Image: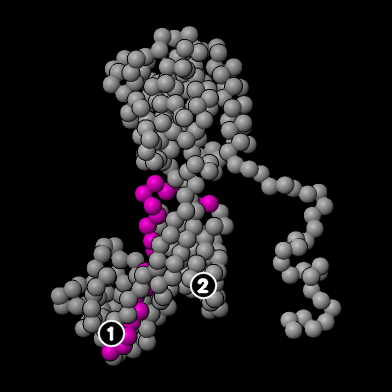
Amino acid sequence: MAATLLALCQQSSREMGINAPSTIISNTAQYAISLLNLINGVGQQLVTEHPWQGIDIEYRFTTVYYQYTATTVSGSVNISALSSTTGLTSTPTYFAVTGTGIPADTYLVSVSAGPATGVLSRAATASGTVTLTFAQIRYAFPSDFDRLVDDTDWDKSTNWPIYGPETAQQWQYLKSGLVSTSPLYRFRQFGSLFQVWPNLNTNDYIGFEYISNYWVAATGAALSKNAFSVDTDTCIFPDRLMICGLKYRFAQSQGMERAKDYAMEWTRQLNIAKSADAGSQKLSMAPRMGRTLIGFDNVPDSNYGS
C-alpha cells in the first residue's frame, strides 16, 4: 500500500535527522510548508521523466459532423437560410466547411441561430442553395492531459492508424497542396487541441493513449489531482523514490553538503523505478520473421488461397 503524504514527509525528515512534523497540510511552520512544496515538485517532475504505466490512459471520442442546406452568394463569405444551426453555435467554432462552391480550407467563423446565418473564412465561388458539410476538426484533450503516447492514434471505425503528429509545414502542405489527399487520416496538436485531417464527414471512433498529469489520489480512490492537498493523499510513484527525491530537493534548497549524496541516491532510485515500471520485450541479436502471420514458413509453393 502506498504511503500517505504525511508518512512520506515524516520518513524523509527522520532520515535527514530532523524532527518529523505531525501534520503537513494544516501546518504553518516553514519546514512543513517547504516539505509540501518540494514533494509536489518531485511528483510533477516525475510525470515528465517517464511514460509511467500508472498514468498511461486510453482515451476515446467520436468525430462530429452536420449536414445542412444553406444559400451561398458568389464572392461573399456570408451564408443564409441555414436549415439548422444545431451543434454549430459553440464558441469558438471548430468546423471545416465543404460543399459546392466552397473553396478548400474553408472554416465556419461564426453562426447565428436567428435568423439562421453564418460567416465563412473564405468567400463562396458560386451562388445557390446547396448542402454544406460542417465537420468538426479540432477536439479538446482530457482535462488531465500531459502528452500523447507515440503511435497509439487509431481510427477504430476503419481500423486504420492516424499518422502524426504532423509538423506545421506538413500540415499546411496537406491543406493547401494540389496533390495531398490520402485515404489515411493525419493529426496535429494545434493550440492545445487534437486536430484531424482530412475533414471527417462520418462519425468515426477515434482513440489514443496519453500520459496523465494526475499522479495523486485520495486514500482508496482513483487518481484525481496533480498535487498533494490532504495529509492522507497517496501517489502512484514508489515510496522510496518519493522519499529520496524529497530529501534531495530539501538538502539542495538548504545548501546542505549531503545534497550530492542524496542526489546519487535519488538518481539510483529513479533508474530502478523506471526499469521496474513495466515488463521489457525480449530482444534478439539475430531476429527472424514471426510465425504467427503469413510468411515464408507457411505460404505454399502453389495454389495459394485455394
Q: Residue 228: give x, y in percent of width and height.
A: 37, 31
Would residue 172 appear left or right of 89 to someone viewing this image?
right
**Region of the chain picked out in magenta, as a range:** 129-149
Quarter holding residue 67: bottom left
Q: Residue 57: give x, y in percent of width and height.
A: 47, 49
**Residue 138 versus residue 39 in the image, above or below:** below
**Tag 1 or tag 2, which sits nearer the N-term?**
1
Please tell me how crowded label 1 is: few (under 14), some (14-19), or many (20+) other residues with Cα within 10 Å.
Answer: some
Please tell me how crowded label 2 is: few (under 14), some (14-19), or many (20+) other residues with Cα within 10 Å.
Answer: few
Magenta stretch encompasses residue 121: no
Q: Residue at x 77, y 69 (%)?
A: 295
Name, please, the residue furthest toward the front: 306
Quarter holding residue 291: bottom right
Would residue 191 appear left or right of 117 to someone viewing this image?
right
Given contact means CB atoms under 8 Å apart, are the residues at marks 2 and 1 in contact? no
Three-letter code, disc 1:
Thr
Magenta span: predominant SS is: strand
Q: Which mark is residue 158?
A: 2
Q: Which residue is mark 1?
A: 69
Three-letter code, disc 2:
Thr
Magenta stretch encompasses residue 143: yes
Mark 2 → mark 1, Cα distance in angstroms: 28 Å
Residue at disc 2, secondary structure = loop
Quarter holding residue 180: bottom right
**Residue 286 versus residue 98 in the image, above or below:** above
Would residue 43 appear left or right of 136 to someone viewing this image?
right
**Residue 70 versus residue 272 in the image, above or below:** below
Q: Residue 145: give x, y in percent of width and height.
A: 42, 48
Along the line of sight, the residue nearer the viewer: 88 or 20: 20
Evaluate whether residue 259 shows in this view.
yes
